Amino acid sequence: MQLDKIVAYHKALADPTRIKILILLAEGELNGQVLAEKLFVTPATITHHAAKLRAASLIHERREKNTIYFSLNHYFINAYGTATANIIYKNANQLPEGEDHPMEDHNQKLKQSVISNFFTAAGRLQHIPAQLKKKLIVLEHMIGGLEPGRSYTEKEINEFIKQYHDDFATIRREFIMHQFMSRENGIYTMNPLEMWMKWETLK
Amino acid sequence: MQLDKIVAYHKALADPTRIKILILLAEGELNGQVLAEKLFVTPATITHHAAKLRAASLIHERREKNTIYFSLNHYFINAYGTATANIIYKNANQLPEGEDHPMEDHNQKLKQSVISNFFTAAGRLQHIPAQLKKKLIVLEHMIGGLEPGRSYTEKEINEFIKQYHDDFATIRREFIMHQFMSRENGIYTMNPLEMWMKWETLK
DNA sequence: CTTATAATTAGATATATATTAAATTAGATG
DNA sequence: CATCTAATTTAATATATATCTAATTATAAG
């Protein structure tokens, strides 16, 4: 049920240690040991929180030898124009509160250029970018056309994607793979984090 | 500290019973006894949750004789274009998930007309509306100019308000009174709910 | 195979919180 | 003042969760 998802999402952000972890990760990826040191907790505690953040799709993980590096979900970073993310970001960089981070501007420009390069004037997707970062921008752009908070049948999702590109099956799979959406019993819903980003970009 | 506020805000929405209360209140105001019946809990439990929702500015209360009627914070209702609010609203009205509620459209139109009636083309506020609902729309419009998540000194707030109207003291007081902002040691910050709305209306 | 490092798991503890029943308070009315 | 109703408070309980220590697992390297 959708209620559980909303609750789980808010629970993930309802703990000071987890917010602090996100603030630290806003500076760049860190492994568990380092996070533990900086927050004066044990690695076991980091594991505990990482599980909750992971469940809410707020972080990514990358393994290198026997070290696991945590990073903010790419979208979370890009969405820091929102208030909570703004706070996380500013805290991370010790910037005076009134100033915007140059990254904000840079990300905006990157998005703009990727969107204008991959979509036609009529709004069709010419082809799916091979580069991950660009692909994610393209997926995010398309998912912005869905209504946050409603459920879609597979048929409806296919129709929706076909507005942009004929290969709806690949794109639908990418939506799931990159956690933009989740599927349950053939019903598709946007994930909470993605909804949140959607709110931000809503006019 | 701002961290606590963010955490408290998310905690308020991190409980299924509280989300259900909001869903029920989306249909209209209800008193504690009725809420308790509908949710199969005791009135004491409702009191408990009401305290948390009140602390997060999510509900309003109105006393009539010895009955207290709870209702959604006016702004929460108007913000239901956001995903969580959308879910609350749709659940409340048993609408097919794809359909928008007519109220959404109505509120949008009301806002449009109030804003164009009270502000000049240059964006100055001509006078403060006497009618509560209109006043709230005007306040919401102005607060949209602030950056969510940052702190402002009183001087900065005054300067900000003077863009719109010379009587900054009255408007500043209204911001506090209607819980758009809170003041601590002379530092002003937008309240979490208002931040949330801000995200939604951000371009 | 042994050793080293990072992460996870398991078990224990403490704190927080959701809930209830019972007692109390607040307000209205006779 | 007595009574009624709604709400709150208090105290108790149960569940959840944040944290730690100690044991275990995963991966790499000698």
Image (cartoon, coloured by chain):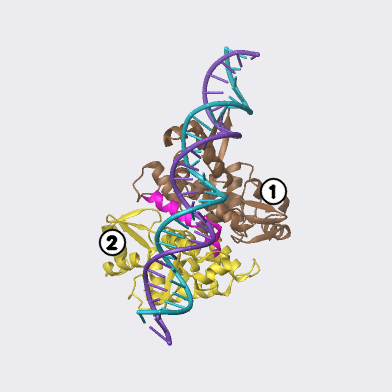
Chain colours: A yellow, B brown, C cyan, D purple
- Chain letter, disc 1 residue: B
Is residue B186 at all visible to an observer of this figure?
A: yes
Which residue type carries mark 2?
Glu
What's drawn in magenta, residue-wise?
A1-20
Q: Quadrant of the N terminus of chain B?
A: bottom right
Relative to the observer, which residue lies in front, C18 or A103?
A: C18
Q: CA distance from mark 2 to mark 1?
A: 50 Å
Residue B135 spot, x, y in % from top left: 61, 46
B149 in relation to D28, above or below: above
Residue A181 spot, x, y in % from top left: 36, 61
Which residue type carries mark 1?
Arg
The answer to if B42 sits in the magenta stretch is no
Residue B40 spot, x, y in % from top left: 42, 35
The answer to if A15 sits in the magenta stretch is yes
Q: Residue at x 60, y 61 (%)?
A: B147
Q: Are marks 2 and 1 in contact (CB under 8 Å)?
A: no
A173 in relation to B44, above or below: below
Q: Main secondary structure of the magenta part?
A: helix
The numbered mark at residue A159 is 2
Bin the neighbour count of mark 2 within 10 Å (Cα to Cα): few under 14, some 14-19, many 20 and up.
Answer: some
Position of residue A90 in the picture relative to residue B22 (left or right): right
